[in-house]
Image (cartoon, grey):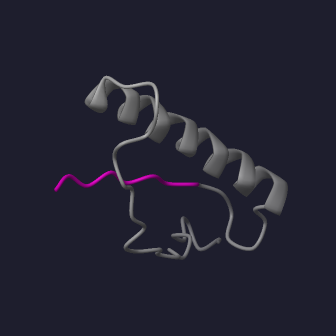
Amino acid sequence: MATLRFQVQGELGKIILAGFMDQINAHLWLLQEYDLAISRRQSASVEWLITDIIERKSRRRNGTA
């Protein structure tokens, strides 16, 4: 099994839903392209599972958030 990691970056608490969904849709498009390349078929054949979602706090630089 392979692991793919996608990251959406932005200031914690300031990522709007529309922007987040745009990133998810872009990642879904990539998964579909990987699927087509792996399976060499026109329809999906790979099952993709979400196994972890992590919220990372922004790092502070020079005493600011």
Q: Nearer the viewer, residue 49 or 57?
A: 49
Identify which residue, 10 or 62, lies in the foreground: 10
Q: Which residue is located at x 54 percent, y 76 percent?
A: 57
Q: Determine the residue positioned at 45% across, 52% down.
A: 6
Residue 43 inside the magenta-drawn segment: no
Q: Main secondary structure of the magenta part?
A: loop
Location of residue 31 (image quadrant): top left
Q: Is residue 16 visible?
A: no
- Give the camera-side residue of 17 and 48: 48
| Image quadrant where one finds the N terminus | bottom left
**In this rendering, is residue 4 above or below 50?**
above
Across and down, in percent, residue 63 comes to: 59, 74
Instruction: Report if residue 7 lies within the magenta region.
Output: yes
Residue 32: % across, % down? 48, 36
Question: Can you name the residue that lies furthest to the left here?
Answer: 1
Which residue is painted at 50% across and 74% down in the image? 56
Residue 30 in sight from this viewpoint: yes
Q: Is residue 25 left or right of residue 46?
A: right
Tell me which residue sits at (40%, 74%) in the image: 52
Q: Position of residue 27 (x, y in %)?
A: 54, 44
Q: How many dots with numbers? A: 0
Q: Nearer the viewer, residue 61 or 30?
A: 30
Q: Quadrant of the C terminus?
A: bottom right
Q: Position of residue 55 (x, y in %)?
A: 53, 76
Q: Is residue 46 above or below residue 39?
A: below
**Quarter location, residue 10:** bottom right
The magenta segment: 1-8
Question: Relative to 50, is 12 on the left or the right?
Answer: right
